[in-house]
Structures are given as structure tokens and as C-alpha cells.
Image (cartoon, helix red, strand yellow):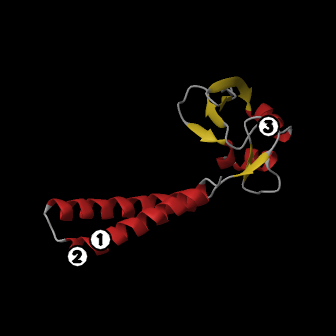
């Protein structure tokens, strides 16, 4: 006869761990809004950590409406979580800006005439502005 060993889990929030908890205790914490969507859950004995928002059963209990929100550090207010597409856009615009900077630096190093460099400079400025705008959308003031 096999003995069934129940898995235990640790919750990590801002570098501090709590637990161990059983799966039913985790569900109870989530139902009582004591877990945050950004908390990490780790099965004891493994090094794999998963955000609560990625665990369907827990995320639905923490956030029954399904909105992309999470509790702030003090637990009082809800703040919007930016979609991954906003971060990807910021990264793409950063790469475009850096590429235009490299081309501009190369052309300057080669001693090209200013009439050849001016369009590249305009492109570099435009790509920098686009990157700045994407960051402002990602982190509004």
C-alpha cells in the first residue's frame, strides 16, 4: 500500500518566504485575499517558482473578476499591470534607437559629409523619441 505524501508550498513575496502551506491552505489564503497576483509559489524541494497569476485556481480566487490588476505593496490599492506587449514595444523601439546610433557613429567615424549624416541624425532622434514615448506609456508619471 502506497502512502500519499501531500505536497507543501512556500509563498515568496518581496524576497521573504512564508509557509509551508498545503494546497488547500493556499486556496484558503487566496480566497481570503491574503495572496497577491505577483507572489511566487514554490513547491518545497524544488527551485521552480510560479507567479500566482499563472496558477488558474489561485488567480481566480485572488482576482475573481479577471481584471489585470494586482495589489500594491501596502495591499490597499489596486494598480494596473502593464501587458507584456507594452514591454515588447519598448524593447523593440530601444533596439531601433541603438541600431540608428551605431550607424550614425560609424558614419561619423568614417568622416562622411554632414549632408550624408543629417538624415541619419534625424532618424536617430526620431527613434530615440519613439523609445521615450514607449517608456512613458509603460511607466506613466
Image mark for residue 115:
2
Q: CA distance from mark 3 to mark 2?
A: 57 Å
Q: Which mark is residue 54?
A: none
Q: Which residue is mark 1?
A: 120
Q: How many marks?
A: 3
Residue 28 lies in what quarter of the image? top right
Q: Earlier in the sequence, mark 3 or mark 2?
A: 3
* Disc 3 crowd, CA 10 A, few/some/many (<14, 14-19, 20+): few
The percent coordinates of residue 130 (x first, y second) are 48, 66
Where does label 3 land, which residue? Answer: 75
In the displayed structure, would residue 96 be above or below residue 76? below
Of mark 3 and mark 1, the one earlier in the sequence is: 3
Q: Is residue 23 above or below residue 136?
A: above
* Pair 3/2: label in front: 2
Q: Is residue 84 visible?
A: no
Judge whether 7 appears above or below 67 on screen. Answer: above
Give left or right: position of 12 versus 21: left
Contact check, label 3 and label 2, Cβ < 8 Å: no
Q: Position of residue 39 (x, y in %)?
A: 67, 37
Amino acid at each position: 500500500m502506497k502512502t500519499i505524501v501531500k505536497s507543501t508550498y512556500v509563498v515568496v513575496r518581496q524576497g521573504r518566504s512564508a509557509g509551508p502551506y498545503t494546497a488547500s491552505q493556499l486556496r484558503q489564503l487566496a480566497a481570503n485575499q491574503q495572496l497577491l497576483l505577483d507572489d511566487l509559489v514554490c513547491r518545497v524541494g524544488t527551485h521552480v517558482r510560479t507567479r500566482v497569476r499563472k496558477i488558474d485556481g489561485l488567480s481566480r480566487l485572488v482576482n475573481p473578476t479577471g481584471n489585470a490588476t494586482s495589489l500594491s505593496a501596502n495591499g490597499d490599492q489596486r494598480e494596473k499591470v502593464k501587458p507584456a506587449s507594452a514591454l515588447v514595444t519598448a524593447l523593440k523601439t530601444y533596439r531601433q534607437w541603438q541600431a540608428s546610433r551605431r550607424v550614425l557613429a560609424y558614419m561619423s567615424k568614417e568622416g562622411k559629409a554632414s549632408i550624408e549624416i543629417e538624415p541619419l541624425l534625424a532618424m536617430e532622434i526620431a527613434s530615440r523619441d519613439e523609445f521615450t514615448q514607449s517608456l512613458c506609456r509603460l511607466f506613466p508619471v
